[in-house]
Image (cartoon, rainbow, N blue to C red):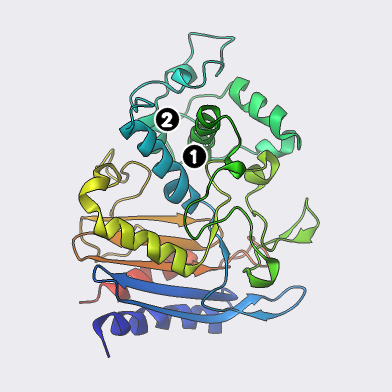
Amino acid sequence: MSRIEQQLDRAFAPLAAAITAGRIPGGVLGVIDSTGQRAIRAIGQAQTVPMSRPMETNTWFDLASLTKVLFTTERVLALAEAGRIDLDASLTSVLPDFRHYNLDNWERKVTFRQCLGHQTPFPAVFPLYTYGRDPDLLRTFLLQHEFAAGPSVYSDINFILLGLALERIAGHWIRQMDPGPGFAWSADPDQSAATEDCYWRHRVLVGEVHDDNCSALDGAGHAGLFGTVTSLLDFAATKLANAGADALIRTPLSARRTHGWERPYEGWSGGEHCSPQTIGHTGFTGTGLWIDFERGQAWTLLTNRVHPTRHFDSGIIALRRAVGDAINAN
């Protein structure tokens, strides 16, 4: 058995245990190294309500906040490298109408780099979808809404605003943009892991975005991307092969964050044994990707832990850490 297959065996055990215990319906685990060797395994159910379907290694997942790093961060940094934007300029350099009725406010001073690192005073949660279903009007509303400044926290608003900047530069909405190789903005329900039985959309969500704000906006920079385990391992392989060209995603902006990504800290999702040169990110639906540049390896854990409801302790935090610790056991 190869080293990567041994890693998969160890890391698969806590995933299988979580499914046996009824904590999550199913999952797919994938591991890859810098030589291109990979191992993938699926277990459990892709859907349990209102029908049952098995999880497959080619099942599509709603990647949720992995959109932030797989799509939005990539495009913002590419525009910066091309000289199209200045990361230390305010968002108003692209969105001049952002809070333009009050030119002397903190929102107009927020920069691209601060948004990438979640170093802004925006609130952690903002239920934009409760203000209506008109995507154009919601975009305008968000740009004019007066937020109360608070402590710097992880906030979807940072990446919703980055997404609006990408749309303004491109001249069309995110859902009209190329999502990248192996990714999509929706997926065939018959080939997708189900997410939530949604209260306000009155259906089990399968192949359509789970995130409420992204749904109301009809696409956004913080969520909405779909992909498979192969999509994520291919992305990770590209990063491992081009580590020097992607310096900013490894460059710290704070004790916990780089440009877009998280970096190791006590209690983080990648476990206790990652090298300092590891980056990672998770998604609310139960997804995650971690890339260890020092060890030349990456792993992704994809689950449908919000199916059929988010209002249940799935144990996803402990599961992610257990998987990471098993990957890096030696």
**Quarter of the picture holding the C terminus:** bottom left
- Pick whichever of labels 1 and 2 is earlier in the sequence: 2
**Residue located 55% across and 48% down the image:** 223
Return the residue found at the far bottom.
1
Q: Is residue 70 left or right of residue 43?
A: left
Between the C-alphas of marks 1 and 2, the distance is 8 Å
Residue drawn 61% across the image and 63% down it? 306
> Is residue 117 among what the camera can see?
no
Badge 2 marks a residue whose secondary structure is loop
* Residue 33, above or below 250: below
Local crowd size for mark 1, using a 10 Å CA cut-off: few (<14), some (14–19), many (≥20): many
Q: Which of 75/62 is in front? A: 75
Q: What mark, if any, has residue 155 been given in the picture?
A: 1
Q: Position of residue 309 (x, y in %)?
A: 67, 63
Residue 298, percent across and down? Answer: 32, 66
Residue 25, picture quadrant: bottom right
The answer to whether residue 178 is left or right of residue 202 is left
